[in-house]
Structure formats: structure tokens, C-alpha cells
Image (tube, rainbow, N blue to C red):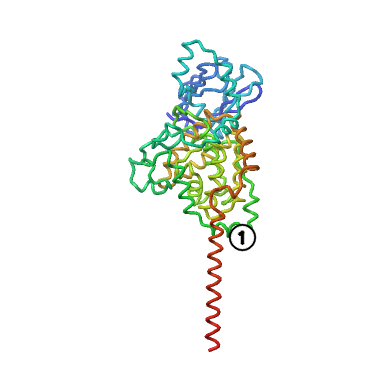
Amino acid sequence: MLIPRFSLSQTATHLSITIRCPYVKFSSSNDDTNGIEVDLLSSNEFYFACKPYYLHLYLPGRVIDKGVPEYKYDIDTSSFCFNYEKEIANEHFQDLDMITKLLNKENKISSNKIEEIDKVLNNEDDDDDDDDDDDEPLWNHMRQLEIDDQPKENLISSYSYGFSHQYKEIFSNFDAEYSLIFDNQLPDTLPTSSIRSCRLEKEQFDFNYEHYLADKHELNDETLFNYKLIIDKELDDQDRDDLKNLKYKQLLIDDQIPIYLGLIDLLYGFAYDQRITQGEPCCESPWNIHKLSSTLSWFDSFTDLPSVLISCCRRTLIYPLIRSFKLARKCLLDVIEILSMGKCAILRCFLQMRRLFLDEEHRYLLNTLYLNDYCLWIQTECQTKWLNSLTEAMKHTIDYELDENNLGLDFEVKNFSWKVNLYEASDTDDDDCVSLSDEENC
């Protein structure tokens, strides 16, 4: 059985479910159903079957079952449209575009399940505390962690990587060449606690001061800086097909903050490539996104906001073709715009990155390690209020704390060394001129 492409829409009083079935096989019998099976298993559970299609949806709100389903069939689009009245008029159903979430019943498993059971056994009532925690913005949590951006104790001797550090020993199943495309070429043997220091050391070694200076003083491409990011807030057909085929699983996350900060790191590479290619990805796009992201290239993770912003800017001044701090700030503002547009826009960006990596040799592993789980997490656990708090935190940090001289690239030392080399080159040219003049006099 095939899962058909579908979409949901709503008015103040009704929910519409549109299902596209281009290969439907109607029954040859004379009954009214014509081979179609439709049922509301409960007020928020929809069932549809018509060979060779099968669809089971968990609706984000409750609708009224009036017995015989009413539907229309559009021959031109090969689509069924079912219309149901909401139990509560004017209720707004959330996440109608979260395809994977609609296809799977949400059974949240807490990583602190033992503690919760213990509280129940002891009849502890901490509902008020939970509400306070939920209402506390992400910005406050991150501020507490900014003073100590160190790996957790349980990661000190760990060799894990990927989304929420849930993968390990993946590369032992592949040839050694699979790890060569990553800056972290020993992911299964480099301790998680050592990734940050190794990354910073490698970046310092790769920093080319002459290239940086040339772009800083000679880059005047107004088209590049004035580009307006275009992200559609609605999923297209390709997005819907990708999501309905996305494998569902439970995500066990101990700490949500590194996941939210990882959004910035991944979206930054996407925003940079969009600006460089003017919204038309090319064969270099997977490399751009991969190289600029510390998450994808080093399997690094972050617990405070300044570190991830600095990482994005550092790698922009070290690796891509165009290395400009002004461009880096533009890309960070693009990330803020994407986050402000909501979960659907963010999901579209991740699906585009996922398709780029899918066609790349070896880089398809990044989908397994990060992007598939991120696409699932955005639909099921990502909260709009935390995204809003994150964008406000980014604006404040970019305006008041992010400075080119605080990137840790030793600009003063490099500048002094560059001036010495320039002076020595100038002296050499003068000596050559003197020698040539002497020869002419002879």
C-alpha cells in the first residue's frame, strides 16, 4: 500500500483533508463507496483506503463524525477532498504542515522517566514548577551557560556524534575514505570533549590573512550584500513527498539547548550558500553548507549562543571563496529571518539541504547523522516560543557582543607578520633597482 500525497487546510469552522490519488482503482461493484473506505476512528483520528493507497492521520484537533463521509473527487488533479466540522468553532489547529507528525501518533518518552515515576509514587505535585520552567525563555537558560561552555561530564570520555550525540562507531562500518570529507577525520576515536580544541587549532592553522585582507578591502559586490532571501512558508509537493517517507522514531533528548543552537549553525551554511548563489544552488552548494557548519564538519555542539555565532563567522573568514565579516553578519541576519518565519520555513530549508546531500557521494551520511532527525524534531518538539526567544537573543548578541576582533584569529599578530613580509619584499625590490642602476651606469 502507498501513502498518498496529502494536505490539510482549515477555516474557522471546518477542516479539509485533500488526498491526491493518481493511480486509484475504483471498485467495479455497484455500491456507493466505489471501493473507498473512510472512517473517523476517533474525533481526531482519520482513516482512508482506496487501492493502492492507505492513509492514517492523527489530527491536531477534534472534528465531528457525522456518519457517512462527504467528499468530492477532482478528476483534473486526481484528488479526494474530505470536509469535517470542528468540535469547537474558531479553534485554530496547529501544525497542519507537519506531515510526519500527522502520520504518527505522538508518544513522548521522557529521558527522566524514572524521576517522574518516583514523583508520582510520592504524590508530589510540581505542576506549578513545570509551568514556570516552560514559560522561562531560552535566553535565560543560555545566559546561565555562557559562563561555562564545557562538555558535560558524561561526554568527557565519549566518542559519540550526530543529533543529540546518539550515534557512535558509524564510520567503522565504512571505508576510511568516508571520513576524509570531514574536518574531524577520526570521529570514532577523537573524544567528544576534545573536538572544540582540535577544531580551533585547525582553523587557526588554515587561516589565510592575505585572502581575508583582499576580500575585506576589495569586495564591493552590491548584488551579494543586497540579496533578499526568498523562503516559501508553505511546503511544496517535493517537500510533502520527502516528509511522508521520512522514517519516524522517538527522539530522546537530555538537553534541548544544543539542538536549538545547532539550528543556527546549520541554517547559517544554508543562508551563506543562498546569498553566494543568489538562490540557485550549484554543485558547490553541498561543500559550502558542510564546510561552514562546525556541526557537520567537526560534529561539534554548542551550549551558549556567542560560541556558535563566533564559529560561523570564523569559518566564513577561513574556508569559502568569499571571506568577509560583513557578509557573515548579513548571513546571520538571514538566519534570524528564517527562524522568525516559523517552523514550516525552517523545515523547508532543512529539506533542501537534505536533498543536496542526498546526491553527494559520502555526504549523504549527514542526513542520517543530523538532517533526518532535525526534520523530525522540528515537526514534533520544536517550540515557537523558544524560536522567538532565540531570535531576540541573536539580535542582542550580534548588535552588542559580536565583533570581528573577538573571533580569536590573532589579527594583530597576523597583521604585524604581514607588514614585516611586505617591508622585506619592498626592501628586496629596492635592492634589485639599485643593482640594475649600477649595471646601467657600467
Check the image and report above or below for 370 versus 109.
Answer: below
x, y percent for residue 136:
60, 26
x, y percent for residue 323:
56, 54
Judged left or right of residue 138, residue 51 is left
- Front in this rendered view, residue 336 or 407: 407
- Residue type at numbered disc 1: Glu
x, y percent for residue 440:
54, 86
- Front in this rendered view, residue 146 or 173: 146
Please indicate, yes or no, whether residue 109 appears anywhere in the rendered image.
no
- Front in this rendered view, residue 296 or 84: 296
Judged left or right of residue 93, residue 168 is left
Rate crowding at label 1 as few (under 14), some (14 to 19) or many (20 or more) other CA atoms within 10 Å.
few
Q: Which residue is drawn at 55% across and 72% down?
A: 427
Check the image and report above or below for 31 versus 148.
Answer: above
Q: Residue at x 53, y 76 (%)?
A: 431
Q: Mark 1 points at which residue?
A: 218
Please indicate, yes or no, whether residue 381 appears anywhere in the rendered image.
yes
x, y percent for residue 324:
58, 53
Give the mark count: 1
Check the image and report above or below for 194 versus 435.
Answer: above
Check the image and report above or below for 422 versus 276.
Answer: below
- Front in this rendered view, residue 194 or 364: 194
Q: In which quarter of the image is the N terminus?
A: top left
Judged left or right of residue 171, residue 209 is right
Q: What element carries label 1?
A: helix
User: In the orientation shown, which residue stands out farthest toward the bottom?
Assistant: 442
Q: Residue at x 39, y 39 (%)?
A: 191
Q: Quadrant of residue 79?
A: top right
